[in-house]
Image (cartoon, grey):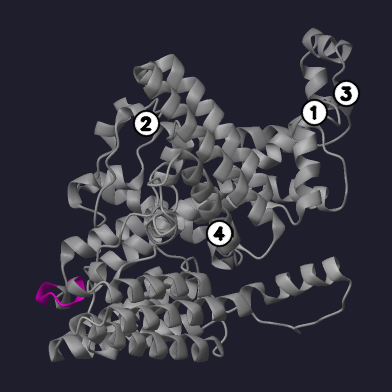
Amino acid sequence: MLFNSYEFIFLFLPVTLLVFFAIARLGHEAAIVWLVLSSLFFYGWWNPIYLVLILLSMVVNFYLGELLSSAYRSKQAVKGKCFLVLGVVLNLGVLGYFKYAGFFVDNLNIVIGTDFNVGHVILPLAISFFTFQQIAYLVDAYNGITQEYRFSHYALFVTFFPQLIAGPIVHHKEMLPQFMRHSTLRPNVENIVIGLTIFSIGLFKKTVLADGVARYGSPVFDAAATGEPLFFFEAWGGALAYTMQLYFDFSGYSDMAIGGARLFGIRLPLNFHSPYRATSIIEFWRRWHITLSRFLRDYIYISLGGSRRGSARRYFNLMATMLLGGLWHGAGWTFVIWGGLHGIYLAINHAWKYSCQKMGYLNIEKFSGFKLIAWLITFIAVVISWVFFRANDVQSAIAILEGMAGLNGVALPNAIIVRLGGFGELLQSVGVEVYLGGGSNFILTYLWVGALLVVTLMIPNTQQIMSQFEPVLKVYESSADNEIAFGQRFTAHLVWSPSLRWALVTGFMAALGILALTSVSEFLYFQF
């Protein structure tokens, strides 16, 4: 079931919410069991067979968590480590089979010339998310941070529907204490109004903005997949359109998850904070998919040694972490290359910061001119990496990058050249080619991209708009030196308050979002 569907908005969500508060009069356990059952129904809507795997996964991990907690209490470190290794291996083994078996076997066949076949493996929905979440739970249980004695509580931690399908990846200690508060069992007008506002903003981002610009990015990637050569502006238009689509798609989902949870009085962790304003790749990863970045840092990068063993090992750990992060997103070489690119970006960024610190030039980052250049470099690097993230295969990605590099020439629609008059003739004299048709599509592509880029850089994000009402567990705090923001003067005028003006704005966005529900459009992160 999609957040952006009539079934969810007009049936599942209101029924689940109303019954939750009605049944909560019987106590916490009844309310928790209802949310677990509702979340399992939500998960099984696509394919009920998915329920078998997630239920088995929860039972096994809950039992292992009990063993780990017992080992911690009895100070049996060796026994605890064995259970932890077993749990991690089991979780990664299941993930590896369902998500990577076909990829591994296909590449093995290419290398050694065999013809092995694992058959058709159905990828269970959200397996990457609930696997990582349960691994984090096992590690926390091993360290004595988490102790859970009721399966219903653990099941709610794993399956709570706002964050089940595409995150955020939450910790047990972040969620269960909130559900155990007595205030959570009673309807709260403030929570409902705030939740509906955030959900409406997210719905508008997804159905109007993300799906609106998608029609200008997808045809370019489809053309590259067929081997069609792409001109400079055509390739850049497609790459930038997808860059904006992914931004508002993921930002919209994150808002809808946060808003949906807030209806129940639950604050989810922040997962998205204007990453395209970042002036470095380091800062980008502090803002993009924040809970995944936290997981990769805490459970992979630091486990590999982090920066404790010298610069060379630090760069190796960065690269290994990002390669695994890329592979987590999908079983394909395009995702591996995407992760590798970001590993290289991060290594270069850390080396730059180290060099500036050594030479005493660290304050250079505070100058507006430098910030603009740093932002532009960061943004272009991210756009290039998104090409691999979106492309059907490596060849398609290379075809788009060739077009972006101008290797297939620069061309403009004839209708645009004609309207440019003498300047159009000048462009032709320096080698700009002309083609018939596509003028309106060209203009709309760059109008959409330009408008959405202005929104990302100048308009406050949802967290900033709702800042007076603690929309998430922990707000994002960053120095102004780490971002480029041209529209800070608008911030004070776009802070939400319970007023008629904001009620009309929220209602207008919700109405447009619902009217745009003309076709099924999955969130991009659902495939991971």
- Look at 20% across and 52% down and name the residue there: 470
Judge by depth and name the residue closer to the eye, 432 or 498: 432
Task: Answer with mark 3 or mark 1, whichever residue precedes in sequence.
Answer: 1
Counting other residues with Cα less than 10 Å from the Cα at mark 2, is it few (<14), some (14-19), or many (20 or more)? some
Quick one: SS at disc 3?
strand
CA distance for labels 1 and 4: 32 Å
CA distance for labels 4 and 2: 26 Å
Name the residue type under label 3.
Glu
Label ID, residue 324: 4
Q: Is residue 121 above or below residue 333?
A: below
Name the residue type under label 2.
Asn
Name the residue type under label 4.
Leu
Could you say where residue 520 lies in the image, as x and y percent from the top left?
Answer: 60, 67
Counting other residues with Cα less than 10 Å from the Cα at mark 1, is it few (<14), some (14-19), or many (20 or more)? some
Disc 3 marks which residue? Answer: 433
- In the image, which residues are magenta? 178-183
Task: Answer with mark 4 or mark 3, whichever residue precedes in sequence.
Answer: 4
Task: Answer with mark 1 or mark 2, whichever residue precedes in sequence.
Answer: 1
Could you say where residue 112 lies in the image, as x and y percent from the top left?
Answer: 85, 70
Disc 2 marks which residue? Answer: 482
CA distance for labels 2 and 3: 40 Å
